[in-house]
Amino acid sequence: MSVEDYRRRYEAELQQSRDAAAKGPARAPHEVAAATLAPGTAAADSLDALLGVLADATRSDDDRRAALISLKAAGFQPDAFAPYEARFRQVLRQLAVEPGSELRYDALQHLSQENDPFVQERLLEGLRNPATALVAPAAALQMLSADDHGAAVSAARDVLSGSSDTDAREAALGVLATDPTAEDLVAGIMNDKSEFRAVRQAGAVALQALNPTAFVSAAQAIADDDGDYDDIREVARNGLRITGLGALA
Amino acid sequence: MSAEIEISTTDGQGRVFLTWTPVKASARLLAPAAAPVRVTLSNAGAAGGGLVTFYAGPAVPGVDHLQVDLPADGSPVDFWVSGTFGHPSLDYGDAVISMSAGDPAPLATCDLMVRIRKDAIKLSDAERDRFLVAMGKLNDAGKGPFKAFREMHVQASISEAHGGAAFPPWHRSYLLDLERDLQAVDSSVALPYWRFDVPAPALFAPEFLGMPPASQSAGDFVQFPPNHPLLFWKTDNVTGIPRRPWYDIQQAPPTVFQGGPWVISEHDTLALSDQYAAFRGMESAPHGMAHVSFTGPISKIPTAARDPLFFLLHANVDRLWAKWQWFYKRRDPTVAATFSPSPRIGHRLNDTMWPWNGSITPPRPTFPPPGGGMAASVLTPLPGTAPTVRSMIDYQGINGGDALGFDYDDVPFER
């Protein structure tokens, strides 16, 4: 197709789309684009309303989840959303500990990305005392893994020493991937043929993060071991391909 | 008798890359002949591979084969070449220029690649894997050059790239810088895009960018098979990629949500306006809405660049801008319809853009700019180490001058 024909075809497609839009609810181009969030605008009023819905435990989970998503989208107009940030965080913290709420996970997940100390304390408490857990151990450990202060390291070690939950063991290894004192532990798991293979995979990834040189040595041995599982040998080979000069410097 | 073909977009290893923008080439006899030799330049590549269009001059219509008369004394004859729109390469060398003088054996051939950014779900398995391997090596488990790209898109730098006129140009520059680093790993790689207004389940298959476990009790980290190049992906302190869609991944994200525009269609995006000031409202819908169609780092500006999906999302945002530029013929940066500035520094036409300009002077971010200047390309001198907003606008060199060295599979070069 020539470029000229391509243009003609695209013009026709665009016109069809405009015609279809014209038959629907009236929506001027400036309405299709998101409105500004300047105070006093309808959109800004809607943010207040959305925060109200999110905070209201009598509203349905669907309504509240829709409000949460809309508020997160408003965050992509950062200058205008800045005045709402503090209140948004406050509402999310309330939601994070709201008994029985299906949005508790979403709130914890959002705040954990900011290393929010309020949720970090509660996630750690839930790992120490399962009766107070807000989410499953694997999810809690993953949410805590972004913290660079190592608050979850002790909990991660406890999971590895005492839990048979494979999801939690994998997540624990993700946390220990930042703990230099855990090198021998994760290396042991990587090499343990009696360990669940998904957990060994997580151990390999953790060792690569902690000590690429040690990983290369261990991975080479696994890759050469005809008696080890094919998928673990593939993880080893994969890591050897990826590990480069930056990691070994 | 022998001859040679030279093309201006040849790298240091002798590899030739074309986009849709015509570039200069030449042909000559390698030894004097008794008389001028008439040769025909034509395509001789693999079926289904890239195709080349030939031009007798820089502003004349292209043809699928071209006759030129080579001087007997070996002087070069100039001509122009581009990739043929709609026929990108799948791999290096699947496009071949053949020069013949009537004999069965050609006088000269030139292997090359028509290297084009494609829809991610239309990549071959080999293209997909080359891209993923290059990303994995660039990340190098958190210790590679990708770290700088992650650090460019953070809370402290939000205003450099968002909420103003430079939103499209800044991200175009960002993607170009990343793509050039990927091409330093594997020169056959072009950045693919996530066309977020159509269903893309293949993009979220385990072999590509993956999905988290079905149950949230196992967490939100994407699960990769043992041989996946992103298995060791690490950003900040975290190994792995947390991401979970809240929409049905077998479909596209909704175009309308809570009564408002959401991940609106390509056509609706282009229909926002033919004027730049209104068109860049796409920063909210569909761009922002595409981001928050998932939970995880990609759903927030300061953390979004931790997820490789971010770059495919923004490649589509850039493609939408490129398509808008093509459709409405918006390439002259001095025209307000093409670009209308915001008053903030970094968002005016001749402003250099952070971090490539190395600035630490307020109101620019005051921490050390990550990554240094823009990566160079042997294929084009543009945009230089400290790109300006202006330098991102006429990316194909429509108004003369060099191109930036990339194109999209569905956005042609058209004067």
Image: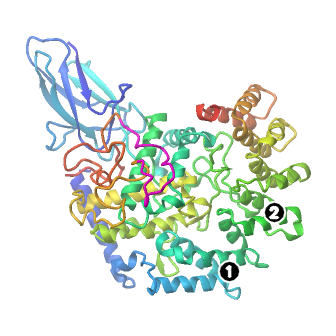
Could you tell me residue A182's position as x and y percent? 81, 42
Residue B186 in view in this figure: no
Residue plotted at (57% across, 83% down): A50
Q: What is the quadrant of residue B107 in the picture?
A: top left
Could you tell me residue B274's position as x and y percent? 27, 68
Q: Which residue was labeled with disc 2?
A: A124
Closer to us: B18 or A226 = B18
The verdict on a common chain for dots 2 and 1 is: yes
Residue furthest toward the right? A162
The disc numbered 2 marks a residue on which chain? A
Q: What's the amino acid at mark 2? A: Leu
Structural distance between the alpha carbons of marks 2 and 1: 26 Å
Q: What is the quadrant of residue B61 in the picture?
A: top left
Within 10 Å of the Cα at label 2, are there few (<14), some (14-19), or many (20+) other Cα atoms? many
Residue plotted at (49% across, 68% down): A76
Residue plotted at (44% across, 59% down): B362
Judged left or right of residue A198, residue B32 is left
Q: Which residue was labeled with disc 1?
A: A61
Closer to us: B127 or B368 = B368
> In the figure, B283 relative to A26: above or below?
above
Closer to us: A57 or B376 = B376
